[in-house]
Image (spheres, rainbow, N blue to C red):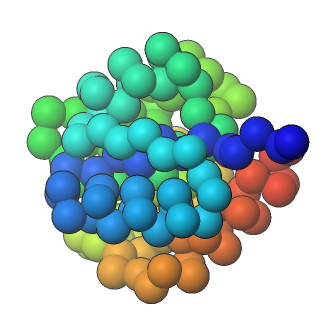
Amino acid sequence: MKTARSILVVDDDPGVRLVLEGLLGSAGYRVRAAADGRAALQLYRQAPADLVLMDLIMPEQEGLETISQLRQEFPEARIVAMSGAHPDHYLHAAGLLGADATLHKPFGPKEPLRTIARVLEEFH
């Protein structure tokens, strides 16, 4: 039996985390969640995920800084950045820092599933 791929969802909005956990879980992914970049790094260091779905604007430690740290410590990490706040600016910066793909918030249920599947397929 094939093991389910793991996704680490990082977003400071509990509602967004809950929706993404439900969406990804129903698609067969194993999902863990963190409310900011600092918590995400701790979880990833304990057990790396197959992909990190990272919001960019968060308190404590924001997504751009977290992407940079993930790339330094785990160059093989697969990262999808998402943002609704000035998305062109932040998503472009996320790409420059090493995000494998980006999502503009708000998005429908098919967009994250397609993007995640594409990134996982490209790198595994």
**Res 3 seen here:** yes
Residue 93: x percent and y percent?
A: 44, 54
Is residue 29 rendered to the left or right of residue 42?
right
Residue 103: x percent and y percent?
A: 48, 70
Residue 112: x percent and y percent?
A: 54, 70
Q: Quadrant of the C terminus?
A: top right
Front in this rendered view, residue 76 or 120 = 120
Is 60 above or below relative to 48? below
Residue lying at the far front of the rendered structure = 1
Residue at 84% x, 43% y is 2
Is 60 above or below relative to 92? above
Front in this rendered view, residue 86 or 45 = 45
Front in this rendered view, residue 87 or 117 = 117
Residue lying at the far left of the rendered structure = 59
Residue at 20% x, 64% y is 15
**Res 102 seen here:** no
Residue at 66% x, 73% y is 114
Residue at 66% x, 26% y is 75
